[in-house]
Structures are given as structure tokens and as C-alpha cells.
Image (cartoon, grey):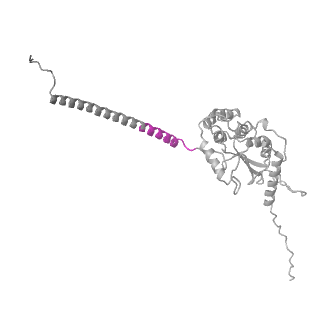
Amino acid sequence: MSSDETPNVPAPRNSREVVREKAQKVHAQQSRARLMRRIIIGAVAVIAVGAIGTAVTLAVTSQVSKPQLSPSGMESDGVVVTDISSMSASAEAPATPTPEPSEAGTASPTPDPTASQAVDVHVYVDYLSPDAGKFERANARLLAQWIEDGAATVSYHPVALLTASSNGTKYSLRSAAAAACVATHSPDQFYAFNHDLLDDQPEVGSDGLSDQELANLAGAVGVDNAKVVRKCIQEGDFVNWAKEATTRALKGPLAGSDDLVLTAAPMIVVNGEAYVGALDDPQELSTFVMSVASEAYYDSATATPTPTPSSTETPTP
């Protein structure tokens, strides 16, 4: 039995066209997706580059806008101590002879302590160095007495040799910069601040004092311009100076010397000669200083012959 019904099957040609159209649509969709991904990636890259550029610009601008500050009132990166009235009682030590030039068995004139014969003492200190603390505790009263008598000029040079020994806080560098802040804005309290930093030190390998604690210590010794000093310390005004001053000391020559360079902290230089004795023995330091003073005194006291009138025979007219 025949039937007039035929199955609804598309002709082969029509099927190929449908498949081609679908393929074209899929391809178009994939192309649009790839294009969108590229646009998004490009936009993200532009934003990232812009952010990095902005950060770099801000950093550079910040560095340029903040001037490289240097402390005032310093000589050869050192603070000449002239006022010890604020020295704490903990600095007291047995009296030790004032350095005067002398010669065994010979009476020697004592130079006027305010004259140029005063001994020139330079003390290089790292506020984290245990030896620097030992020297200060043992000899503070001795140095103070020489300053009071005018027998010596004493300069303290803050340096930062142990910057890497405080868990990344750079305490040596920050404390040296803090000392420079006090020397600049409240010089009369520098000696007390310097002494307290050395007398009660943090341990090597610890974080050290924070900037806020350093500022508090400055306030405790009665600095003038307390707000200015605090701002100077907390903003690290003289950190770069402290780093550069340390570099200069390492290269030498040290103040008052011809060829000495910084090799340790503390380093004590007297009239250009390095002290190598015990750091905790005031008598040994005093003996060394008096020896150097005597050498300098006699080197400068060169005898000048006094002209004597010669007897000449007067011709007889």
C-alpha cells in the first residue's frame, strides 16, 4: 500500500547551511569573548601601571620635597659640650686629677686651663654599644670635671655602627639622629640626653627605644622647645645626617687627627691620638690624657733665646 506522506527531513544542502550558520554564530561569540578579555586585561594593566607610576611619583616627590637636613651647632659632626649643669647624679665618680703637663722630678709651669693648651678630647659613641655605655658610666664625672675646669674640650660624636643589631628598627641610627635633634634645638641639654642614652641602654639584639620613647627621654631631661624636639625625633629629620656622619668617620680622618679612622665605638681620640686603655678605668684614662697634654705642652713651649747686649769697645777719640 502506497502512502503520499514523506518524512520531514531537510535536504542535504539545507542542513549544511544551518550548520554553517551555527558555526559562524559560535565563532562570532568566541571572537567577541576574546576581544572582551583583551580589553579587560589591557584595562587592568593600564590601571596597574598607573598605580605603580603614581606610587613611584609620590615616593620621589616625597624625597625631593623633604630637604636633607643637617644639625646645627656641630663641629666635625661632633657636639662640643660646654654645659654640664644638667648632668644626672648617676654620673658621679671619684675625683681624678685634672690633666696638667708635668715632668718627673722637675717643676713645671701649669698652663692656663682656658688657653690653647686645653686637651682636645673626641668621643665617638654608638648608643647601642655596651662598651660605649661602660666608658660613659666610668668616666662621665672625670670628663665633666675637666670641662668645668677648662682643662679639656670634650666633643661627643654620635655614630651608627650597630644599625643592623636591633631587629630591623635601626636603633643606632635613630638614636644618633635623636641626639642631633637635641643638640640642634636644645644644646644645653645635650650632655644630659647623651649621658642618659648611654647610662641606661637597650641590649644589643633588642628593638631598642621607639622614636616616641626617645622623644619622651628628651622631654625627661628638660629640653627646650620640647614640641620641636619631639617632631624632629619622630620625623627622623637627621637620620640621613647620622648615616652620612658615620660614613665620614669610617673614611677618616677623625677630628683632630691626621690619619685615624673610626674602627669601633666608643673610640676616644685625645689630641689626635687614639686611647687604647681600659674603658672602665678613669685613672688610666687620666694618665693617658695627662701624658698627651704634657707632650703637647712641651712641644709648644719652645724656648726663645733672649738677646743679650754685647759689649763693644768704644773707640777713643
In the image, farthest residue toward the right? 105
Whether residue 118 sits left or right of residue 14 in the image: it is right
Give the image quarter of residue 172. top right
* Res. 302 image quadrant: bottom right
Can residue 98 be spotted in the picture? no
Position of the N terminus, as image quadrant, is top left
Residue 290 horizontal/vertical position (percent): 82, 52
Q: x and y percent of residue 138 in the render?
A: 79, 42
Picture residue at 47% right of the left edge, 40% below the top: 56
User: Relative to residue 8, is residue 262 depicted above or below?
Assistant: below
Residue furthest to the top in view is 1
Q: Is residue 51 magenta?
A: yes
Looking at the rendering, in which quadrant would you find the C terminus?
Answer: bottom right
Q: Is the magenta stretch mostly helix, strand or loop?
A: helix
Q: How many marks?
A: 0
Would you place residue 124 above or below residue 109 in this image? Answer: above
Question: Viewer-proximal residue, 277 or 61?
Answer: 277
User: In this picture, which residue range is highlighted in magenta?
Assistant: 49-68
Residue 207 x %, y %: 65, 35
Residue 179 forms part of the magenta stretch: no
* Residue 65 drawn above or below residue 105: above
Q: Measuring from the top left, give residue 295's x and y in whole percent.
A: 80, 57
Q: Which of 101 and 254 is in front in this view?
A: 254
Looking at the image, which residue sits at the far front? 1
Q: What's the residue at 52%, 42% (across, down)?
A: 63
Residue depicted at 45% across the width and 38% down the height: 52
Q: Is 227 positioned to the left or the right of 140 in the image?
A: left
* Residue 22 can be seen in this image: yes
